[in-house]
Image: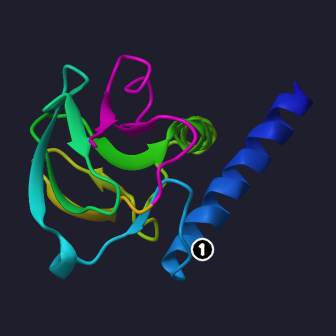
Amino acid sequence: MKTCETITGILAFLLGASMALADEGHSLTFGSPGKESEAKRTVEFLATDNMRFSPGKLEVRLGETVKFVVRNGGKLKHEFTVGDRASQRAHALMMKKMPGMKHEDEPGTVTLEPGETKTVVWKFDKKPATPLEFACHEPGHYESGMKIAVVWSR
């Protein structure tokens, strides 16, 4: 069991370090924080207590910057996080280990209290090796299907 806890700790550290690098202008493997002035479109997402985001999928182009306006329409806390499958898994493990953690310093993640609306601006400047998705990692939410598949357009 200690091995599992060690691996979880390492993954949490790596995800936190990679998000810190993004804050310093370094690019992650799945894109980078965008500038609102460069966003060519705005996509609105609704997070609901039936463990879904609406719309349920998104198409993006390589190089595109998108402004996401995410509203929590439920009574439960939700989050919206951008990442490839590997970073989503690491984030899920970190959330299990540290429930209730805050994401103020993570440019691709927002935590939403009931009724709250927040914005994420993301530049899709790299196509990751694993599928890209948006997800909620509040306890049990991701496992219940609270994720959005991202499709790359040509």
Q: Quadrant of the N terminus?
A: top right
Report the residue at 47% width, 34% height from top.
131
- The chosen color scheme is rainbow
Q: Position of residue 118 (x, y in %)?
A: 19, 60
**Residue 151 in magenta stretch:** yes
- Report which quarter residue 141 is drawn in: top left
Where are the magenta residues, as a range? 126-154
Main secondary-structure element of the magenta-colored stretch:
loop
> Against 145, is 58 above or below?
below
Question: SS at mark 1?
Answer: helix
Report the residue at 27% width, 61% height from top.
64
Q: Position of residue 151 (x, y in %)?
A: 31, 35
Report the residue at 20% width, 77% height from top.
38
Label 1 belongs to which residue? Answer: 21
> Against 73, is 60 above or below?
below
How would you rate the neighbour count of disc 1 (Cα within 10 Å): few for under 14, some for 14-19, many for 20 or more? some
Q: Amino acid at mark 1?
A: Leu
